[in-house]
Image: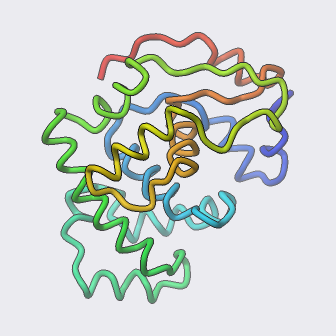
Amino acid sequence: MADCRWAKKDPLYQAYHDDEWGVPVTNDNKLFEMLVLESMQAGLSWLIVLKKRKEFRRAFGDFIPELVAQFNHTDMERLLSNPLLIRNRLKMQAAINNAKAFIRVQAEWGSFAKYLWSFVHYIPEIHQYASCDQIPPYSSLSNRLSRDLKRRGFQFVGPTVCYSYCQAVGVVMDHITSCDRYSVLSHPKTLHV
């Protein structure tokens, strides 16, 4: 299988690459999960996050925003004492804060998916990179998304985190053109969210 170079580094990467990365997501709980995980990744490798993903799902109530928004001091201490998680107090506080902001966006837009996908007019942005080296760390799209999320009270959502997030949930598709997944995902359709 011809694929993106980074996916060959570990079986977890390969499975993520083959099954999730670049696939359009419209389910709000999944969008919240990926937002939390991408924020947790800041300064770390995605492989670390993937290895801890199952425990994150358990600890964060399957990433149901309404549950996470209710987390209190006791929950914070539980999260920070769990060695299977990324135990960064600021990132944990941001996840709880972001759950509250996520719910506010849902209330305003009807769903977070409607809000997020409006940035690309509900059609995935398909790039045509021949090499992983051509993929940028951020873009004008991720800059706009970052600014708007911060304006809405989200934390740990800089342009680079937002670009990774957009890649993860298929808002942008950055499989290289020689990757088998590129041929599958390079025919975008308008999403109905």
Question: Where is residue 57 shown, x and y percent of the image?
Answer: 43, 62
Residue 84 point in image, percent of width and height:
55, 78
The answer to whether residue 20 shows anywhere in this view is no
Instruction: Give the total of numbered labels.
Output: 0
Instruction: Using the image as rendered, state which of residue 3 and residue 54 is in the foreground.
Output: 3
Q: Is residue 111 above or below residue 157?
A: above
- 181 above or below 168? above
Residue 24 visible, this orientation:
yes
Question: Residue drawn at (32%, 64%), measured in percent from left and top?
Answer: 61
Does 53 sit left or right of 104 as displayed? right
Residue name at image x 38 percent, y 61 percent: 155
Relative to 19, residue 123 above or below: above
* For residue 111, side relative to residue 32 (left or right): left
- Quarter of the figure that contains the C terminus: top left
Q: How is the image coloured?
A: rainbow
Looking at the image, which residue is at 38% across and 18% down?
Answer: 121
Q: Which residue is nearer to you in this view: 185 or 108?
A: 108
Judge by depth and name the residue closer to the eye, 180 or 32.
Answer: 32
- Would residue 105 be found to the left or right of residue 177 on screen? left
Residue 12: horizontal and vertical position, in percent?
70, 53
Observer-nearest residue: 23 or 96? 96
Residue appearing at x 41%, y 40% in the figure: 145
Residue 110 screen position, x and y as percent:
17, 33
Extreme residue in the left direction: 107
Q: Taking 151 as reference, is 177 above or below it?
A: above
Q: Quadrant of the N terminus?
A: top right
